[in-house]
């Protein structure tokens, strides 16, 4: 892609944000902050700082930050290769079952919304689930949950790569300002290209499956903890 085409693509997210402000979906301060972030990244890219840090800019407003930290811990955790290969095989079936469940839920929700259309119209700020913007979504707890989910997700990809003899070049985060919007583990391209198809599927499935396992464990722990909350006096209690 030539320079003019790249500039045109990078402006698209800004135009989308302006439309969100115009229709009342996103507040002005959010779009202004992202605009400052966009021009800061543009300056760092043109001055060569991003290249010197081994960082990249994606879609104009996303910073791809790479690091080699965590690789020693990865080697330690992935030592039991037989166990992690078994987990990778189980992950394939977990993902297929989850995919079937999601298709069923989406289909049933579509049919239900057609038969019984909602009577109340949501406010524009509640259409998108944005922490701190959506009325019923707080800011810090979703961000903390996202960081934990991204960490275990990408580490699971890295563990599967090492369990199958593939090298992991870098770990990294996708940042929009101080907020993480994604993460990645970067295996060696050659190792991925020559790996058998089954091993690559295990690597891809390990990330979503570890998030599912972590969610199940969290729900069990939440149930155990909440079962100890017993009212001292019978009757109606308000929070």
Image: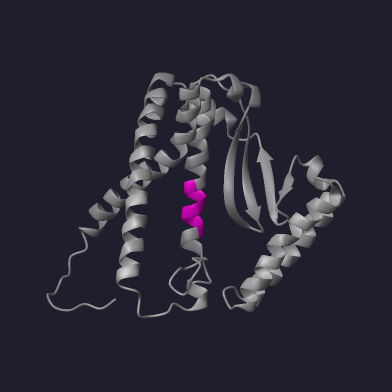
Q: Quadrant of the N terminus?
A: top right
Q: Quadrant of residue 70?
A: top right
Nearest to the observer: residue 85 or residue 141: 85
* Front-most of residues 115 and 94: 115
Q: Residue at x 48, y 79 (%)?
A: 123
User: Is 5 left, or right, of 233 in this rendering?
Assistant: right
- Residue 144 in magenta? yes
Name the outermost residue toward the right.
Answer: 47
Q: Position of residue 42 (x, y in %)?
A: 81, 56
How far from the left and from the top, in percent, is residue 53? 77, 42
How many numbered callouts? Answer: 0
Asked whether residue 218 is in view, the answer is no
Specify whether 198 is left or right of 188.
left
Quarter of the image containing the C terminus? bottom left
Q: Which residues are magenta?
A: 143-149
Location of residue 15 with respect to 172 vertically, above or below: below
Residue at x-position 38% and y-position 39%: 95
Residue 157 in the image: x percent, y percent? 51, 34
Q: At x 40% / y 39%, what residue is drawn?
A: 209
Q: What secondary structure characterizes most of the magenta part?
A: helix
Question: Residue at left 71%, top 61%?
Answer: 12
Q: Which x, y percent locates residue 73?
A: 53, 30
């Amino acid at each position: 892609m030539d320079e003019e085409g790249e500039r045109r693509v990078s402006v698209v997210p800004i135009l989308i944000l302006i439309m969100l402000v115009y229709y009342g979906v996103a507040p002005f301060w959010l779009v202004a902050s992202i605009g400052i972030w966009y021009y800061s990244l543009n300056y760092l890219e043109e001055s060569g700082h991003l290249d010197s840090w081994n960082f990249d800019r994606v879609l104009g407003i996303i910073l791809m930050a790479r690091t080699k930290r965590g690789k020693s811990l990865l080697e330690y955790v992935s030592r039991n290769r037989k166990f992690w290969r078994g987990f990778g095989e189980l992950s394939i079936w977990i993902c297929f079952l989850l995919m079937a469940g999601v298709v069923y839920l989406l289909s049933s929700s579509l049919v239900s919304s057609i038969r019984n259309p909602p009577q109340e119209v949501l406010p524009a700020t509640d259409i998108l689930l944005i922490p701190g913007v959506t009325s019923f979504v707080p800011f810090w707890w979703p961000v903390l949950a996202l960081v934990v989910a991204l960490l275990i997700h990408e580490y699971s990809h890295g563990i599967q790569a090492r369990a199958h003899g593939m090298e992991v070049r870098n770990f990294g985060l996708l940042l929009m300002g101080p907020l993480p919007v994604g993460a990645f583990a970067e295996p060696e391209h050659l190792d991925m290209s020559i790996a058998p198809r089954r091993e690559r599927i295990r690597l891809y499935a390990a990330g979503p499956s570890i998030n599912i396992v972590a969610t199940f464990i969290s729900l069990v722990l939440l149930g155990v903890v909440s079962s100890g909350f017993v009212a001292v006096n019978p009757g109606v209690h308000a929070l």
